[in-house]
Image (cartoon, rainbow, N blue to C red):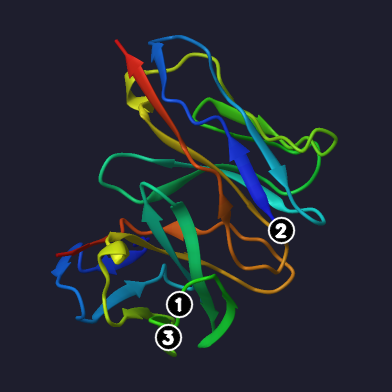
């Protein structure tokens, strides 16, 4: 069974640009979550989608947005990039139904570097 | 709010030594608890989980018991190998909250 696939693996952008990251969940998983990992702040939750609806959102500015498609694939967009956005962005998927707490399975991440 | 506190390390051990990484949490209700491991250049892998008080999660020789009375979920392994060198994260997720709250991570290095 294929795992969570994130593309691209590496990205280099400059300040002010925007970027879109992609995540394909494990087949059958309907929940996709995004996390930012930095040495200073650790792992921080960005948002979670289930059946194309955002169910939870972390404390990030509006420059960070996401969406989920009908096939459960998800994209994350960051506009007006800042140096502090340099991080490893991790996507995770799970079955996600209500009333359960299925573990999340992570991809290998997209390493975003802002110059 | 929900939070996880774990010993930050780094922890350096010799092969076959005993490993303990302490993890305590603050949460409302009865969250599920997890340990994840991250190897260099990779994402997080689920190591083990526990969903209710007194549950013991175990995998690959690692164990952790959900202790509600002490709000703890300490990770243990009786005999570590060089291949266990990684960063270990304790995490919690309240039911129907749809997000993980992570500890800061503990870097473990095992020497041959």
Secondary structure at numbered mark 3: strand
Q: Chain of mark 3?
A: A
Mark 1 on the same chain as mark 3: yes
Q: Quadrant of the C terminus of chain A?
A: bottom left
Q: Position of residue A39 (x, y in %)?
A: 36, 46
Write down the quadrant of residue A58 in the picture.
Answer: bottom right
Callout count: 3
**Mark 1 burial class by Cα count in 10 Å: few <14, some 14-19, many 20+:** few
Q: Chain of mark 2?
A: B
> Measuring 39% from the left and 48% from the top, which residue is drawn there?
A40
Residue B3 visible (yes or no)? yes
Inter-mark Cα distance, 2 to 1 = 20 Å
Q: Position of residue B40 (x, y in %)?
A: 28, 40
Q: From the viewer's side, name the closer residue of A91 and A39.
A: A39
| Up/down of B46 relative to A23, above or below | above
Residue on which disc 2 sits: B1
Mark 3 on the same chain as mark 2: no
């Amino acid at each position: 069974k294929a795992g969570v696939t994130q593309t691209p693996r590496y990205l280099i952008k400059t300040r002010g640009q925007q970027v879109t990251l992609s995540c394909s969940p494990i087949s059958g998983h309907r929940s996709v979550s995004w996390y930012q990992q930095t040495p200073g702040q650790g792992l921080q939750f960005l948002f979670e989608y289930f059946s194309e609806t955002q169910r939870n959102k972390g404390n990030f500015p509006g420059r960070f947005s996401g969406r989920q498609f009908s096939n459960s694939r998800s994209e994350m967009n960051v506009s007006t990039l800042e140096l502090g956005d340099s991080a490893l962005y991790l996507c995770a998927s799970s079955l996600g139904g209500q009333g359960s707490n299925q573990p999340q399975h992570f991809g290998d991440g997209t390493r975003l570097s802002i110059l | 709010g929900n939070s996880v506190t774990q010993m930050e390390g780094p922890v350096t051990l010799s092969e076959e030594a005993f490993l303990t990484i302490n993890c305590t949490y603050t949460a409302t209700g009865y969250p599920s608890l997890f340990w994840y491991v991250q190897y260099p250049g990779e994402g997080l892998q689920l190591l083990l989980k526990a969903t209710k008080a007194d549950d013991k999660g175990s995998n690959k020789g690692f164990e952790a018991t959900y202790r509600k009375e002490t709000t703890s979920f300490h990770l243990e392994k009786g005999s570590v190998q060089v291949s266990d060198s990684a960063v270990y994260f304790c995490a919690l997720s309240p039911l129907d909250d749809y997000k993980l709250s992570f500890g800061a991570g503990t870097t473990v290095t095992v020497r041959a």
